[in-house]
Image (cartoon, rainbow, N blue to C red):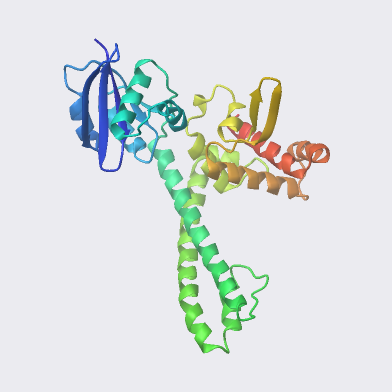
Amino acid sequence: MKHYCALDVSVKETAVCIVDETGKICRETKVATHPDDLILVMKDPKWQIERIGLEAGPLSQWLYEGLAKAGLPVICIETRHAKAFLKAQPNKTDRNDARGIAQMMRVNLYRPVHVKTLTSQKHRALLTARKLLQEKAIAIENDIRGLLRNFGLKVGLVGKVKFEERIKELVEDRPELREIMQPLLTARKLLREEFTRLHKKVLDLVREDEVCRRLTTIPGVGPVVALTYTATIDIPARFAHSKAVGSVLGLTPRLNESGESKRVGRVSCCGDAMMRSLLYEAAQVLLANVKKWSWLRAWAMNIAKRRGRQKAVVALARRLAVIMHR
């Protein structure tokens, strides 16, 4: 008899539920959240496991890799689809969630999610850390501007290179403010230095990767966009058509149709937020670059004349995603 297994993962413990092909619960237990402990439960000879359901989450990539290496038929399933299915249960517990996921796997009512390769995960971690350092440095700069504005000191338009010099110039005659600003400037300087180090690593990776170098030849696409795109798409063959990339990244309109009413809203904003924002920025750069003309910019300019600039930028971002995949 075939069996179907479900894992409801939390940080410390994972709820495991195993059902047979008739839906009868064969075993329920909780084990430590580690691939080795889960393998001991599912490698029991009395279980003929057909599918193992694992909901996508922060620990899913690590657990998926460990279970797949052990030869288990593990499948990572889509979170929103699982949430909609489990809503029918009156009480939400780890035990009930595991039962619901097990039934989803039994009746084949799930949506599989692509689990990225280890290389793409490492690239994504690098890009996330780089963005975090950049955001923290900008946050400190904005806080410094706000603190000084209370005393009538306006920083004004100044670049990141001369920012520290400008702040020291403003607080030169105010010892108390100078003591307050110095720790903030030191922290900002350290964040900027570490950000530069990670950014250099990104440039080195792009320089060594043939695919990234080819993507940077597209107008408006730089090294950060290219590396983020390859880390997000991971394996291009998982998309049957290049046009599907736009909807996966949340760059297609949201539709709400019921009876005779049909509403076309803004973009769905589903999928990877970092990739979507970078594509939007690349489209803005391409549309504003008057020095270099291209057919892609001309196509976007025609849309801007008919529908407005904002819709033209979104359409251009979606088309960039399709061209990069193609």
Query: Could you tell me residue 142's position as x and y percent?
Result: 57, 67
Tell me if 65 is positioned left or right of 222 in this view. Answer: left
Where's the C terminus, which quadrant? top right
- The residue sitting at 27% across, 18% down in the picture is 19
- The residue sitting at 31% across, 40% down in the picture is 10
Whether residue 71 is visible here, answered yes or no, is no
Tell me if 23 is positioned left or right of 167 in this view. Answer: left
Query: Could you tell me residue 240's position as x and y percent?
Result: 55, 21
Query: Could you tell me residue 227's position as x and y percent?
Result: 52, 43
Query: Image height check: is 156 above or below 256?
Result: below
Whether residue 286 is visible here, answered yes or no, is yes
Where's the N terminus, which quadrant? top left
- The residue sitting at 64% across, 28% down in the picture is 256
Which residue, as the protein is rendered here, is positioned at the far left?
45
Query: Image height check: is 238 above or below 63?
Result: above
Q: Nearer the viewer, residue 251 or 218?
A: 251
Query: Could you tell me residue 194's position as x and y percent?
Result: 45, 62
Tell me if 275 is positioned left or right of 110 in this view. Answer: right
Q: Nearer the viewer, residue 325 or 147?
A: 147
Q: Quadrant of residue 8?
A: top left
Q: Quadrant of residue 160?
A: bottom right
Q: Nearer the viewer, residue 137 or 207?
A: 137
Which residue, as the protein is rendered here, is positioned at the far right?
305
Query: Image height check: is 8 above or below 139?
Result: above
